[in-house]
């Protein structure tokens, strides 16, 4: 069809264009090595983009999601001719080009106003997607005064799921796993209580879940997202400080519209773990660490015979206590 001057051209790029590239320098080889599969993967990067048409509500929400995911996020402020539900190839290409395994895509139309699509990728292919409708939204800028300073950008959030539906309803279990991957951030073995600066809370009512898309009996599947800043205050009890929560935004009410669940074979491949991850790492023998963080090692050598050690021999360092050899019959005598 004929395109207008204001309409951007369609993105017709193949994923093979990036897979067939070969590095020509050491810097390029290091860059490609960072994108190779690893036993311990890098923190997941989120790509946030807009469709051909978006609303102010969607744009503000994409900006807030970018702030939640920083520094592992990229925000495209220009419009893109991408339709994830009709043809996901352009979106997969953008995710592969930016090394992003998470994406958020915002659109706006008369049929689906204030539309937000969140998804995950595996091996540069879309694993699953959730389409939400933004019903009520309050940006983070409106909570700047009452947040009490907010939280640092790289602080790992605590994810809280309110309600028993997250444990009993199958659809909510799948959505909880999806939200944990999307908002969880970098995995950590332990977090100090003083390092906990923000809490992201999700609440959902079990009514309407478990039926076909759109719910049954007029009930809608609504997920409410809230974010709070954590402030530790002095407490009357000496055991633990008093925890004060202040809402810092965003405050969003999302209605689930469409869901694309992962294919069984692709999900099985994504959940597969290498054999090295199941076994505990081998402990280095005879290696210890000092109090200053230095690495010390102990070496076991066989017993050495110093008499057989080859050294430089000098005439003045001959063996003592050995009688000189007796001369012949014609030798002179001493007086």
Image: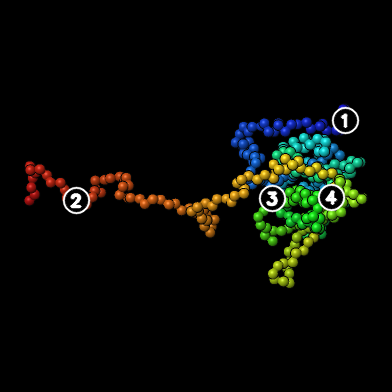
Viewer-proximal residue among 171 and 202: 171
Of the image marks 2 and 4, the number of the one nearer the N terminus: 4
* Residue ID at (30%, 49%): 307
Q: CA distance from mark 3 to mark 1?
A: 43 Å
Question: What secondary structure is marked by label 1?
Answer: loop
N-terminal label among 4 and 3: 3
Q: Nearer the viewer, mark 1 or mark 4?
A: 4
Give the labeled residue for mark 1.
4
Q: CA distance from mark 2 to mark 4?
A: 104 Å
Say few, some or many: other residues with alpha carbon within 10 Å of mark 3 (under 14 / 14 to 19 / 20 or more). Answer: some
Q: Nearer the viewer, mark 4 or mark 3?
A: 4
Residue 27 vs residue 93: left or right? left
Q: Name the disc covering residue 210, or none.
A: 4
- Of labels 2 and 1, earlier in sequence is 1
Q: Residue 207: where, in percent of width, then height?
A: 87, 54
Crowd around label 1: few <14 · some 14–19 · many ≥20 (10 Å): few
Outermost residue to the top? 2
Q: Are marks 4 and 3 in contact (CB under 8 Å)?
A: no
Gap between marks 1 and 4 measured at Cα: 44 Å
Residue 206: give x, y in percent of width and height. Answer: 84, 54
User: Would you name the residue on which mark 3 appears?
Assistant: 186
């Amino acid at each position: 069809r004929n395109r207008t001057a204001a309409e951007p051209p369609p993105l017709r790029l193949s994923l093979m264009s990036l897979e067939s590239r070969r590095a020509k320098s050491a810097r390029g080889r290091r860059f490609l090595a960072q994108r190779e599969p690893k036993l311990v993967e890098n923190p997941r990067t989120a790509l946030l983009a807009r469709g051909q048409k978006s609303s102010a509500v969607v744009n503000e929400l994409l900006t807030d999601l970018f702030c939640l995911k920083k520094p592992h996020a990229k925000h495209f402020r220009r419009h893109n001719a991408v339709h994830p539900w009709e043809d996901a190839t352009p979106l997969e290409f953008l995710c592969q080009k930016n090394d992003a395994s998470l994406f958020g895509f915002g659109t706006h139309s008369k049929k689906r106003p204030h539309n937000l699509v969140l998804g995950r990728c595996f091996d540069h292919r879309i694993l699953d997607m959730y389409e939400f409708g933004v019903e009520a939204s309050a940006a983070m800028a409106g909570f700047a005064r009452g947040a009490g300073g907010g939280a640092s950008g790289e602080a790992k959030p605590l994810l809280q799921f309110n309600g028993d539906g997250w444990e009993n309803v199958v659809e909510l279990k799948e959505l909880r796993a999806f939200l944990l991957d999307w908002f969880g951030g970098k995995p950590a073995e332990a977090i100090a209580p003083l390092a906990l600066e923000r809490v992201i809370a999700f609440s959902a009512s079990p009514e309407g879940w478990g039926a076909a898309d759109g719910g049954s009996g007029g009930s809608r599947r609504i997920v409410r997202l809230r974010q709070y800043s954590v402030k530790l205050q002095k407490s009357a009890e000496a055991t633990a400080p008093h925890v004060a929560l202040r809402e810092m935004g965003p405050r969003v009410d999302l209605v689930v519209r469409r869901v694309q669940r992962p294919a069984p074979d692709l999900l099985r491949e994504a959940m597969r773990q290498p054999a090295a991850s199941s076994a505990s790492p081998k402990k280095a023998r005879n290696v210890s660490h000092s109090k200053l963080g230095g690495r010390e090692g102990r070496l076991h050598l066989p017993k050495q015979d110093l008499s057989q050690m080859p050294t430089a021999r000098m005439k003045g360092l001959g063996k003592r206590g050995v009688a000189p050899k007796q001369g012949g019959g014609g030798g002179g005598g001493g007086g």
